[in-house]
Amino acid sequence: MKKILLFIAIICYGIIQSQNVNIPDQIFKNKLLNHTNPVIDTNSDNEIQVSEAEAVTGIINVSASDISDVTGIEMFINMTEFSCSESKVTKIDMSSNTKLTYLEFNNAKVSSLDISNCTELKGLSCFGNELKSLNIQNNKKLELLYCYNNKLTELNTENNIELKIINALNNKILVVNIENNTNLEALVLSQNLITNLDVSNNSKVYIFRTQDNPNLKTINLKNGNNQNFTFSGDVKSNFENLPNLETICIDDLNNTAFKSGISNQVGKSITFTNNCSTLSNEEFSIENYVISPNPIENILTIKSKKEIFKIKIYNYIGKLILEKKQERKINISSLKKGIYLLKIFGKNGEVKIKKILKK
């Protein structure tokens, strides 16, 4: 009986391996059929068998084409790199491609991405798309992240300790917490909506570009590496067009070259300090409500002349974490560090929403 079952299993496996991969987008299929390095259609039958897909252990590049659907890529389970830049692709699901180390889909139309199972991923380049969110929590080996020119409102990198480069220029990001990214060397957050930035825990950062952030008020640059910042050349830092910038905390107040480099770019009077505790007492307001401090360590305070019915706090994936009624001082010391969504419900039915940072 066991021999019969084994025989049936072998037959079934053989049938599966000889089956053709379903690739509905003909342009994508043609790209795969004509792929040369490596050759995928090894038997030249103008079809991609499952066995042929599984045999690919290297790079697949189908960029610069009118591909709109990459269905079928899930069968390339041993592929290590995939590129489909300059295409019309709107959705990428790499959940079956667990050996992927590099993914690139620049200047496409992607609004949906699943890389949750790509635990070997080291490089992600997805600039110039329609992404409103980016879940990289399971990609703990990620070193390079290029996600600029998207529609991101937040960027959670707390699990990505190996990150060396973050380029998130030209999004709609409100809050960034990079405290855990201790290997970070280059941080580009220009053209966003950030209010406060803290790189004090990122001792390797020497490229820092945050120009064109109209809401940015304070920067903590006291990371012990200010001497390696430069204000010219390809690796220069940039502090231009920050109309609301008030205070920057730095390593050494006697480093006049560093202060001058920043001041010349900012183009207005700002305060330099080496006492970074002064940066933690900021208040931020939404209509009729003032919330402080920012970031928050233990107690969240809400000031308002209006009566508060209740408040709710959600985590970054939308799960309700905390709910309080008619309170203006809320203890959030038990919450983990990260970004949360605060909802304030007024007695008159109004609802105000604000992102907060728990440190």
Image: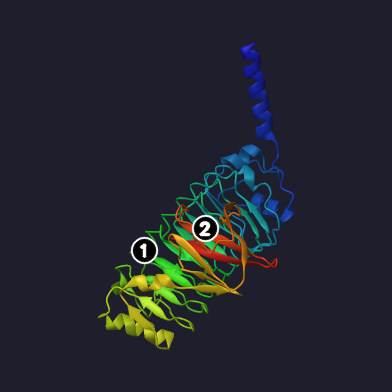
Seen from this angle, which residue lies furthest left?
254
Residue 230, percent from left and from top: 35, 77
**Residue at position x 62%, y 18% in the image:** 6
What amino acid is found at the position of numbered circle 1 in the picture? Asn
> Mark 1 or mark 2: which comes first in sequence?
2
What amino acid is found at the position of numbered circle 2 in the picture? Leu
Q: Which residue is mark 2?
A: 124
The reply to whether residue 146 is visible in this rendering is: no
The reply to whether residue 184 is visible in this rendering is: yes
Give whichever of 314, 195 is nearer the camera.
314
| Cα–Cα gap, marks 1 and 2 | 21 Å
| Mark 2 Cα shell of 10 Å, populated few (<14), some (14-19), many (≥20) | many
Residue 303, percent from left and from top: 53, 71
**Residue at position x 39%, y 87% in the image:** 264
Disc on res. 202: 1
**Residue at position x 33%, y 70% in the image:** 222
**Residue at position x 46%, y 75% in the image:** 210
